Image (cartoon, rainbow, N blue to C red):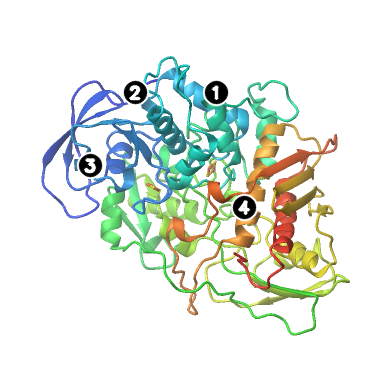
């Protein structure tokens, strides 16, 4: 591997995220190279992504320390670098993905490609480092990437527990754990209709991923390595950095601009939020009537691991937050590219617009909350937060539901978020008996999915035209099934009567962890027709089956 830290000892100024502590040198080893940095109170993540320019180390939530994207090895042990003060690693050895051997990089990359364990790829470098640490902890004499006869790699359950320190919003964990088993040699590649994995057929695989992600998305060995051109990784090193101030986020004048992320955050004076004890309350009242089923949803967070970012050169075209997927619709209408362009022009300098995790929770779009009642004949009323396009989305699958848009005080909503509106309609109609759980759900795209949810797990079939790349399709369908299960049973954001979001940390969103995710099996039904998105149909089918399995309780999440 190319190691982007020079072999020479060098001194670099570190920006502060806290109070400034003047000038002490910190000596450490990074990816095998000696490094000298000036400690001014920053974190290890600041150093790795800043002066050392190691872009496999991702920032998904700093300084919350809750998403795992910034995980590196410190003396062989996984550590989240965003909450590790630089001074604490003085004299120690830090390893990033860039510091792994070529053989290890290839082994992990191929395992994730073979299983579909990486979709956008933002979370994966941190997970790989976690797995490398887990593997290393179990191997006394690790040579040639092989365990000796008397050594046993940690099993799947242990790997799942190790993932508690991470969040992946795309994959639903299962294929990540498949990748663990493949990489350490305790399971074969679990490809359903192929006897042997072959490198993905670039363009064809990309096409399936783009259909499923609803935004340009690529597949291949660079993806698990986090090398998909995320805006925060590709911005010029001399770019100014902008963070939200107190005004509306689509107003460039409200952004605080400084030389580094740490300086901009300090100047903005933002105090990082915490999880609240405030209740998660459905924001819309049920319609009056005598219904066979009623459903109220709550605010939930799309929670893409790559927080939206964008950058632009003066008079240039902005690079936006859609480098490898669009967070299943949650990023497609981002205003950040326009903000980056305006700020670059105003400052006559490249500008990186870099909101924090809590900024994105505050102003990022959500799926519109609903409250509805339905009868077994398919008629009913669905009250939904006013959102352009939502009535049409519902009508496409549930023409008998009367959609009533209501004003709801809260964060912005979007009909582009995965299956927004129509998935809620499918859930409600299934609970009312107008649709039969286990029978095919037909999406507006024409895909069909069935789902059976019981104590043995989640079993899915999907028919969505030519699969093109079954590994990719299964990965997205497993991720969609996890997202649906998590939405129905566990997710919610506390939003008060003034519309202020109070759950601002990654762990407060309620996303179901690897150890709590049921076994998901996906059967891809043969079809030679035109390929269409299949995972949204899976999302709706699994959501409906999960709701029925949990007793069709009126309010989400069901627990
Ligand atoms: S960025 Fe460090 S844990 Fe999320
Ligand atoms: S692949 Fe894990 S967050 Fe996208």
Which of disc 4 and disc 3 is earlier in sequence? 3
**Helix, strand or loop under label 4:** helix
Q: Is residue 49 above or below residue 169?
A: above
The residue under label 4 is 483
Which of disc 1 and disc 2 is earlier in sequence? 2
Who's the residue at 36% across and 31% down the image?
Answer: 96
Q: CA distance from mark 1 to mark 4?
A: 28 Å
- Residue 89: quadrant of the picture: top left
**Helix, strand or loop under label 3:** helix
Who's the residue at 31% across and 26% down the image?
Answer: 31
Quarter of the figure that contains the C terminus = bottom right
**Mark 2 Cβ inside 8 Å of ligand 1:** no
Q: Is residue 92 above or below residue 551?
A: above
Which of disc 3 and disc 1 is earlier in sequence? 3
The residue under label 3 is 86
Outermost residue to the right: 377
Q: Are marks 2 and 1 in contact (CB under 8 Å)?
A: no
The residue under label 1 is 185
């Amino acid at each position: 591997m190319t190691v982007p830290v020079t072999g020479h000892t060098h001194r670099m100024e570190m920006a502060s995220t806290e109070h400034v502590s003047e000038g002490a040198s910190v000596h450490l080893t990074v990816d095998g190279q000696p490094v000298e940095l000036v400690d001014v109170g920053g974190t290890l993540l600041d150093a790795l992504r800043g002066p050392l320019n190691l872009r496999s180390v991702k920032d998904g939530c700093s300084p919350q320390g809750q998403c795992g994207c910034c995980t590196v090895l410190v003396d062989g042990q996984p550590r989240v670098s965003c909450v590790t003060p630089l001074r604490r690693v003085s004299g120690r050895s830090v390893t990033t993905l860039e510091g792994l051997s070529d053989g290890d990089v290839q082994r992990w990359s191929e395992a994730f490609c073979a299983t579909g364990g990486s979709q956008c790829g933002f979370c994966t470098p941190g997970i790989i480092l976690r797995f490398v640490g887990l593997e290393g902890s179990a191997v006394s004499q690790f040579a040639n990437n092989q365990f000796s006869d008397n050594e046993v790699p940690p099993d799947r359950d242990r790997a799942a527990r190790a993932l508690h320190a991470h969040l992946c919003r795309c994959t639903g964990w299962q294929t990540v754990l498949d990748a663990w088993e493949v990489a350490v040699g305790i399971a074969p590649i679990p490809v359903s209709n192929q006897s042997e994995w072959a490198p993905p057929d670039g363009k064809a695989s990309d096409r399936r991923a783009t259909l499923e992600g609803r935004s340009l998305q690529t597949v291949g060995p660079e993806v698990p390595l986090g090398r998909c051109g995320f805006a925060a990784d590709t911005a010029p090193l001399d770019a100014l950095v902008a963070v939200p101030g107190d005004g509306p986020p689509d107003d460039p004048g409200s952004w605080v601009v400084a030389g580094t992320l740490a300086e901009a955050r300090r100047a903005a004076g933002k105090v990082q939020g915490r999880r609240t004890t405030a209740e998660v309350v459905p924001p819309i009242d049920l319609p009056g009537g005598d219904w066979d089923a009623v459903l109220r949803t709550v605010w939930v967070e799309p929670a893409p691991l790559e927080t939206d970012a964008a950058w632009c050169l003066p008079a240039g075209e902005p690079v936006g937050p859609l480098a490898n997927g669009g967070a299943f619709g949650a990023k497609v209408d981002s205003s950040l590219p326009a903000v980056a362009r305006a700020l670059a022009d105003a400052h006559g300098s490249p500008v990186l617009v870099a909101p924090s995790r809590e900024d994105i929770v505050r102003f990022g779009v959500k799926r519109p909350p609903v409250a509805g009642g339905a009868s077994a004949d398919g008629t009913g009323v669905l009250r939904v937060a006013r959102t352009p396009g939502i009535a049409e989305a519902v009508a496409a699958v549930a023409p008998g539901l009367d959609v009533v848009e209501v004003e709801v005080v809260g964060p912005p909503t979007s009909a582009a978020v995965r299956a927004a509106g129509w998935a809620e309609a499918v859930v409600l109609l299934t609970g009312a008996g107008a649709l039969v759980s286990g029978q095919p759900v037909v999406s507006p795209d024409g895909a069909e999915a069935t789902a059976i949810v019981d104590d043995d797990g989640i079993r899915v079939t999907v028919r969505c035209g030519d699969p093109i790349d079954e590994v990719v399709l299964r990965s997205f369908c497993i991720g969609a099934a996890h997202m649906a299960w998590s939405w129905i049973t566990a997710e919610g954001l506390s939003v008060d009567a003034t519309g202020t979001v109070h759950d601002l940390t990654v762990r407060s969103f309620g996303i179901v962890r690897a150890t709590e995710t049921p076994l998901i099996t996906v059967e891809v039904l043969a079809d030679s027709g035109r390929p269409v998105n299949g995972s949204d149909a899976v999302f709706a089918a699994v959501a409906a089956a999960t709701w029925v399995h949990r007793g069709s309780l009126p309010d989400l999440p069901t627990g």
